[in-house]
Each structure stands twice: as structure tokens, then as C-alpha cells.
Image: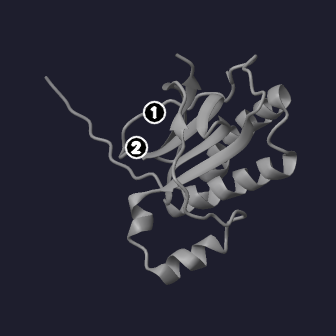
């Protein structure tokens, strides 16, 4: 005798899921602050609030946070890339493992955001309305190059969505 079992369900992404993932980004940033002196507590709170809003709306493409010297990302820099899991499984790693001991002399903390394809489908009025809900008013700028390469090292997920984290490494 054989039998089969089918389970179907839907996961709804909520503000609680967005807060869960954004808190992990904030924890990574607190580690950067402790090791390298930046970003400030106020900026960490703003980045966390921005990530929550971007995730809720589905507008986050990538967010890169870290140090830049001579116009290029250096160690320690972290890049978060949003992903819809489309029902697939994913890890929900603990935050941390931010590289310690990097040379940030002459470098400044910087951030760079790209939007998802959902953002590009908005009208200018919709984009303007959304940008009023986030703590940073962003302007167009060229994306910095990386002095080294990216290594995927963490996945933060909840509610059917994920943020893949990659860290800049030196050659």
C-alpha cells in the first residue's frame, strides 16, 4: 500500500519579519562600530529603520555598508542582497563574524543602496511618497568598486524572504 501527502501554504511577509532581519543588520553594524568606531548609534538606528521599510515594501535590491578608501570598498564592508525565497528553504543565521583587525586608516564609513525591480515599476510620485517614509534621502551616485572580492557568509531570512550577506575580502 502506498500513500501520499501534500501540504500547501502561503507565507505572508509582515513587519515583524522585516524587523527580525533588520535587527541582524543593526547587530552587524554595532560590531563594526565596536571594532572600527563607525557608524554612530543614531545612524545604526536609521539604517535599521530604512531596511525595515525597504523590506516591507519589497524595494530593497542591495545595501552595502562599510568603509571606503580611494573610492573603493575595503575590508570591513558588508553587502546585503534581498531575495524572495519563492517557497524555498533558507538559513536564518545569527549575525556576526564581522572581520576584525582591518586597516581603516584613511577610510571613511559609506553606504550604497540599489533598489529592486519592484521599485523601477513605480511612478515618480510613488517613489517620492516612499522616500518620505525613510530616514535617508538618497541621491544618485556611482557605485564604488571593490578593492578585493565578495564572499557570501551569512543569510538572514524570515517570512519567505531573505537577505544574503557578503563580506569584502582582500586579495
Q: Nearer the viewer, residue 52 or 131?
A: 131
Q: Which mark is residue 46?
A: none
Q: Nearer the viewer, residue 160 or 84?
A: 84
Name the outermost residue toward the front. 70
Q: Is residue 32 left or right of residue 159?
A: right
Q: Which residue is mark 1?
A: 90
Q: Please give the name of the residue rendered at 82% of the width and 25% of the height, measured from the top-left corner.
A: 35
> In the picture shown, does residue 112 fall above or below 120?
above
Q: Please give the name of the residue rendered at 43% of the width and 79% of the height, measured from the top-left corner.
A: 123
Q: Quarter of the image for the N terminus: give it.
A: top left
> In the picture shown, does residue 82 fall above or below 1?
below
Label 1, secondary structure: give it.
loop
Percent coordinates x, y for residue 27 in the rendering:
74, 36
> In the picture shown, does residue 125 fall above or below 40?
below
Q: Please give the name of the residue rendered at 48% of the width and 80% of the height, measured from the top-left corner.
A: 124
Percent coordinates x, y for residue 68 in the rendering:
66, 37
Q: Nearer the viewer, residue 150 or 22?
A: 150
Q: CA distance from mark 1 to mark 2?
A: 7 Å
Dividing the picture into quadrants, the one containing residue 74 is top right
Q: Which residue is mark 2?
A: 85
Percent coordinates x, y for residue 62 in the rendering:
51, 47
Q: Residues within 10 Å of mark 2 (few under 14, many from 20)?
A: some
Name the outermost residue toward the bottom. 125
Label 2, secondary structure: give it.
loop
> In the picture shown, does residue 79 fall above or below 42?
above
Q: Earlier in the sequence, mark 1 or mark 2?
A: 2
Discs 1, 2 touching: Cβ within 8 Å = yes
Q: Nearer the viewer, residue 171 or 154?
A: 171
Q: Residues within 10 Å of mark 1 (few under 14, many from 20)?
A: some
Percent coordinates x, y for residue 95 in the rendering:
67, 30
Q: Is residue 17 left or right of residue 30?
A: left
Colour mode of the rendering = one colour
Amino acid at each position: 500500500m502506498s500513500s501520499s501527502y501534500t501540504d500547501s501554504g502561503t507565507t505572508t511577509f509582515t513587519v515583524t519579519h522585516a524587523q527580525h532581519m533588520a535587527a541582524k543588520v543593526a547587530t552587524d553594524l554595532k560590531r563594526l562600530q565596536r571594532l572600527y568606531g563607525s557608524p554612530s548609534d543614531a545612524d545604526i538606528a536609521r539604517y535599521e529603520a530604512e531596511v525595515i521599510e525597504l523590506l516591507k515594501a519589497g524595494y530593497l535590491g542591495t545595501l552595502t555598508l562599510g568603509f571606503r578608501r580611494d573610492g573603493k570598498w575595503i575590508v570591513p564592508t558588508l553587502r546585503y542582497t534581498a531575495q524572495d525565497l519563492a517557497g524555498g528553504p533558507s538559513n536564518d543565521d545569527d549575525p556576526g563574524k564581522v572581520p576584525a583587525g582591518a586597516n581603516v586608516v584613511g577610510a571613511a564609513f559609506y553606504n550604497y543602496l540599489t533598489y529592486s525591480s519592484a521599485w523601477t515599476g513605480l511612478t515618480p510620485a510613488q517613489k517620492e511618497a516612499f522616500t518620505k517614509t525613510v530616514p535617508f534621502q538618497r541621491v544618485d551616485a556611482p557605485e564604488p568598486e571593490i578593492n578585493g572580492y565578495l564572499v557570501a557568509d551569512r543569510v538572514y531570512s524570515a517570512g519567505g524572504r531573505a537577505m544574503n550577506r557578503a563580506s569584502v575580502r582582500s586579495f
